[in-house]
Image: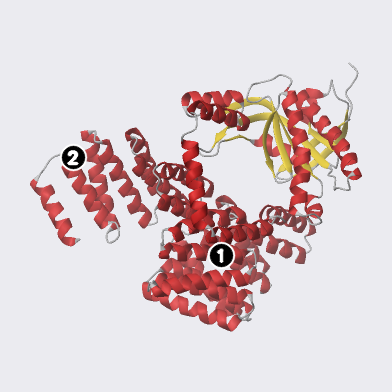
Amino acid sequence: MASEIEQLLSYIQQHPGNSREVVNACNKISLLYLESKPEAALDYALQAHRMAIVLKYNTGAAMALQYAGMSCSSQRKFKEARKYFNDALALQEYTGEQENTANLHAKLGNTLLHDGEYTLALNHYEKAIALRKLMNDSLGVADLYTNSGIIYGLQGSHTLALRSHLLALKTYEELQEEKRIASSSANIGLIYMGQKNYEEALKMYEKALGIRRKAQDLKGVSDMMVNIGNVYHAQEKYTEALEMQLQALQLRKDMGDELKMASSYSNIGNSLKTSGNYTEALDNYFLSLHLFTKQNDKRGIVQSNVNLGELYYELHDHPKAHEYLEKAIKMGEETGLKNLVRKAYEYQSQLFADERKFEEAYTTYLNYNKLDKEISNTETSQQIAQMSLRYEIEQKERDAEAERIKNAELTKAYSSLENEKKRSDELLNNILPEEVSEELKQFGKTKARSFDIATVMFADIQGFTRISEQLSAEEIVSGIDEYFEAFDKIIESLGLEKIKTIGDAYLCAGGIPVADEQHAVKTVKAALEFLKVSEELRSKRKAEGKQSFDFRIGIHSGKIVAGVVGIKKFAYDIWGDTVNTASRMQTSSEPNQINISEATYRLIANQFPCEYRGEIEVKNKAPMKMFFVSQKEKDI
């Protein structure tokens, strides 16, 4: 490498001035310096970029910005890296070159992942996956599925995480990519670990450990030792757990990997705390926090703060316990680390209860319970088991399945273009408002719009968690589907816009995407129809011996922003304080009641009789006036 760099430097000295060849030489030097001298790599990349701009050499300028971003990433300067990658992407899209565009989306996703911006990272991974599929790059697609699976796991979406990792593992095994097979096995083990399926987790970790030992991959071996140590800890084999973690730490010290050392100190602290050695546990947690902070690893920082908060709680040092748990909650919510935030809320609730601050304890417990419901819904374990079984069957029938998929794709490729266009138009109109889909087809993108006044409605099932514990996954899904299908028909008949369903909640709005003076009236009418059809379904399902549901409905009117999110799977969504307030109205409602805000009441008071409920406390807001809508219209 040194001789190649010397040759390139000699070429640059012999050819002063700006030329494409010199730009390419500077870019090549930047690439060669990336690992050994990232600061020098950045200097040469920026030098190449300046010359390329003068020459109007877009390809060279885009490559220079990409190497500048990679240099910053290697130095963990993620905000600077994002700027360079975004600038490179803007230039690259002019060229229409898919390979580098896909690379940039993937690198942006990786940078955002490290910086804790998980939703944005997933968006870039989706774009990169779409391009890689067009290029028939199955290995590249699998790598992106792996990264997406890691993010889903961090967010607590275990089903999506497992699906992504299984898709990646299937491709890696087809291509006999041993190193990647080990990584996927480890990732799947992490999901099993999160589900407390320790035997399956251990199988996956040991599979990965065997591959990595064979390859003499010390970093990978240390990672698997840590994971196996975590399994032993969960199985209450504390001596074996500590021994495994100490071996992993030594390997990581030998490699000088501070980020991995931070993780090891955290795990060792856990083992020491469990065995009652609080002083040494505290020392290890602080070492972990120091290294994670030094490396700007936000997930590690949050985990360390949770660990310290929990340990100080055990030591009955409540002020310090509160201090570290608050830090964990603040950064964890900013970065979308639901699992860790849930854990922090759990300990904080216990703290408040011990301090006899029962109102704060209850509020904090509600926050914990909300996250727990989002992460640990009753279907998750069953879905994961089904996915695992499906993967095992697919392994045994891989050749036949591959042939079937190949034939199906050939059949689709030769189908009528006109029929495909008609079908895609129908699908697009089914998921987006007609006005928005037309804009998307015409311009290839849509603009978000602000609406000065619209009405938003939330409806959710009362006591859904309790009910779901008594039903199978199939009974839950079919039951919700029967209600929501009826709601869809009501929404369509009144010209409202269905936004989405979130578990057992239904979200819709009036006055978008086209303004409508009757938005509030129509939304309240829809709510009344929801209750009417719910009553009809209650009688029907009771006669059939099936579980019926009671709905709480909340409505608020105000300013919102609406637009399309995503590039692979379009979704029309809404944002703003009005949406949050409508959700609060639903939370403050009662079974089979429609709870509306004062803003909505003023718009519908002449048409619907309402009952004033008084001013009611609302989370993160001042008390708000609320009204129940009577289930009949006024005679006017």
- Report the residue marked by disc 1: 190
Q: Of the residues shown, which amino acid type is indicated by label 2?
A: Arg
Q: Is residue 278 left or right of residue 52?
A: right
Q: Quadrant of the C terminus?
A: top right
Left or right, residue 162 beside residue 531: left
Q: SS of the residue at dot 1?
A: helix
> Nearer the viewer's eye, disc 2 or disc 1?
1
| Residue 20 position in % (x across, y down) | 18, 40
**Residue 479 placement: quadrant:** top right
Residue at 22% x, 53% y is: 29
Q: Residue at x 19, y 48 (%)?
A: 25
Specify the quadrant of the image occupied by residue 211.
Answer: bottom left
Residue at 85%, 38% in the rendered image: 537
Q: SS class of the residue under badge 2? A: helix
Q: Which residue is mark 2?
A: 20
Counting from the top left corner in percent of width and height, residue 146 is at 48, 55
